[in-house]
Image (tube, rainbow, N blue to C red):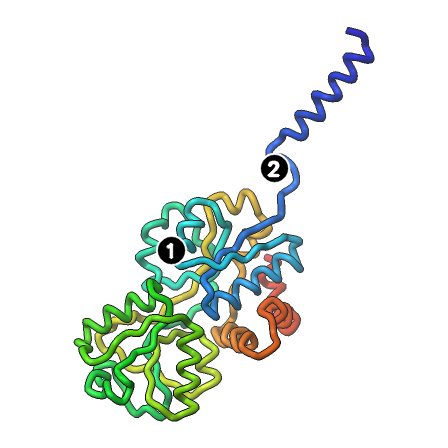
Amino acid sequence: MTRKIFIAALTVLTLWAWCAQPASAGKEKKTLQIVYVEWDCATASSNLAKAVLEDKLGYKVELLPVTQPILWTSLASGDADAMVTAWLPETHAVMYAKVKNKVDMLGKLVGGARLGWAVPDYVPLKSIDELDANAAKFKGRIVGIDPGSGLMQLSEKAMKDYGIKHMELVEGSGTIMTSSLADAIRKKEWIVVTAWSPHWMFGRWQLHYLDDPKGSLGKEEGIFKVGRKGLEKDHPAAWAFLTRFQYEDPAQLQQLMDWNQQKGTDPLQNARRFMKENPKLVDSWLNK
């Protein structure tokens, strides 16, 4: 073999070896998939995470709306990278228990969260155990959200715990629930809905939770962030941000959710508005 042929062959082999290196050996591939269920709180926080990751850290982020079971299994299998709306220790307890050894907890997004059944303030009832006797005034309905959600599972338990025989727990979605609530309030009709906070509806209307003396709907919870195994190694900058990403107060999340309900707005645009109005908070997510 001549010297020129040897050098050419060596060059080709070197280039082949360089191109064949795994991505982790070179520059980080800055693409991420964040999964979320299309609840108002999850939509708001997921878009805020996307805005920070793209605008401040140079990632390309795909937001993937999924059902609640897939939310967890996609992280456990590594098909998605992260989610930012896990309600614990009770609401998502069953699903988290199935995958907890296959995912990584990234810390709390916000505290002071809760589930319950809510009524407009003009409804004089104070407790869940008063509902069945007043079923006719509510047209025999408790207006729920998407079937299979943690809130609906706990609501089914509450129906049994309180012996509610004359009312039906109606499945729907978060949008259907708030639309029904808005319509009832406009007509001053009695209505009871499956509710959670933080939620924009508590800022828009005068509502109160019904007391839950049996504790069927759980106690105060936190909203947490969860990542797939290996996220820290594959995307260290994104992992560092997600571990620090948190609201100072539930009211901040509720405000962002309320912006998303205004006509002509976009959740990603509102997330960027939130970033502009809260620069110190955003800096705390990016710097140690």
Toward the top, the furthest residue is 1
SS of the residue under disc 2: helix
Q: Residue at x 32, y 59 (%)?
A: 93
State the quadrant of the N terminus. Answer: top right
Number of residue marks: 2
Viewer-nearest residue: 246 or 179:
179
Residue 212 rendering spot, x and y as whole percentages: 26, 78
Viewer-nearest residue: 70 or 171:
171
Of the numbered discs 2 and 1, the one sitting upstream in the chain is: 2
Q: Dots 2 and 1: beta carbons under 8 Å?
A: no
State the quadrant of the C terminus. Answer: bottom right
Residue that carries the numbered disc 1 in the rendered image:
69
In this view, 35 is above or below 181: above
Residue 117 rendering spot, x and y as whole percentages: 32, 78
Q: Residue at x 29, y 86 (%)?
A: 138
Residue that carries the numbered disc 2 in the rendered image:
23
